[in-house]
Amino acid sequence: MPAVARVAAPIAPPAVPRAAAQAAPITLEQKDAASLATAHTGAVADPATPAPRSMRDPAAAMAPKDELGAMRHELQDLRQWMQSQMAGLADAGPLTPVGEQLQALGFSTARARQLGSQALNLRGALAAYLGKGLQVAADPVSAAGIYALVGPTGAGKTTTIAKLAARLVLRHGTAAVALITTDTYRIGGVEQLKIYGRILGVPVAVARDGEELQQHLRDFADRRYVLIDSIGLSPRDARMAEQMQWLQALGEGVTRLLVAGAGLAPTAYAELWSLYRRLPVAAAILTKLDESPSFGAALQWLVEGSVPLWFYTDGQRVPEDLHVPSLAKITALLEHDPVTRFDSFPAIAAAPAAAATARTA
């Protein structure tokens, strides 16, 4: 009897519920998870696999320890930045003649475009911008107290503190003023201030650490005005932290003034302010305006950073080249007006004769 081959009947697949037969739609988050999983492991991830909670929960996606969430957050920031840049390019047009003048004076292109489109001439643009935003004091450093000048190297702090001391001596006499310097690193820094002290007839003390600084302040407790000349350091100098600690330890008993040159780049002002504002700083002094006729970047930093401007300097003369700012003076400086550029503050009108007498004494 011939052998009969036995053929097994095909096995029917198990019944699949109707709801499961339809594949669930794949979300964008699941696709992102699958792509990232492939990039990290080299294996092909199943896109239908539910995404991790960090991808489904926006709050978890922003957690610092979640690498995937941090990557998505950075991509979102990059997309928003690109969109803003493209929008800016789309809106950018040629500058008006006034806008070109403002840009030449150091204002940013965006600010020059805005102000130039709203004013008929340079004076009108400056008046509108500075009149609303520049904070000035009518009579700064009039209240008795301790004033510390801080700022980067080369800003002119020592010369500025000599001008300020001379201004106070002319108003209140030599018995009302004392000077302290912490600038023991710069060659000749201490001697330079001592020379100014001898000319003005005021004492000068040297503080090499925080304890000496505190002791000198106690010694000068009977003086109405104590001016501290701090060391000029680069923001990246390791000794900067030590100086900051000395000044912060004085608390609210000292008024700190940031001395900055008028010809810095916008990024330099932003870096300075991010460092010194933690002291905190009460106001700013702009120096070397005679060397930086285009100081729009400095003014833009003051206005948009809400930093009050108490003084500006435009020369080496002590104390004639220390000025209390006003809208008219600042505008004239930018417009190169020779009359108001060297107009001294009325309160020190007798300064040249007094300074000459002090130098020959």
Image (cartoon, grey):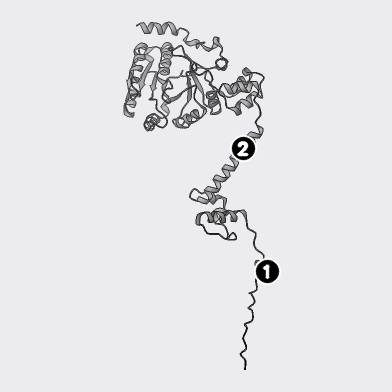
> Mark 1 packing: few (<14 Cα in 10 Å), some, or many (20+)?
few
Figure check: 202 above or below 242: above
Q: Which SS class for mark 2?
A: helix
Coordinates of residue 121 in the picture (x, y in percent): 65, 18
Residue bearing the label numbered 2: 84
Q: Which SS class for mark 1?
A: helix
Q: Residue at x 50, y 22 (%)?
A: 263
Q: Residue at x 59, y 27 (%)?
A: 109
Q: Residue at x 42, y 11 (%)?
A: 170
301 lies left or right of 181: right
Residue bearing the label numbered 1: 18
Coordinates of residue 85 in the picture (x, y in percent): 61, 36
> Mark 2 packing: few (<14 Cα in 10 Å), some, or many (20+)?
few
Coordinates of residue 330 in the picture (x, y in percent): 55, 17
**Can you name the residue that lies furthest to the bottom here?**
1
| Residue closer to the observer: 204 or 65 | 65
Number of labels in the image equals 2
Figure check: 122 above or below 270: above
Q: Quadrant of residue 328?
A: top right
**For residue 228, which numbered disc appears in the image?**
none
Task: Please say whether residue 253 is visible from this viewpoint.
Answer: yes
| CB contact under 8 Å: marks 2 and 1 | no
Residue type, label 1: Arg
| Residue closer to the observer: 312 or 186 | 186
What is the spatial separation of the Cα atoms under label 2 and label 1, in whole angstroms? 48 Å
Q: Earlier in the sequence, mark 2 or mark 1?
A: 1
Figure check: 339 above or below 264: above
Residue type, label 2: Ser
Task: Please say whether residue 220 is visible from this viewpoint.
Answer: no
20 lies left or right of 337: right
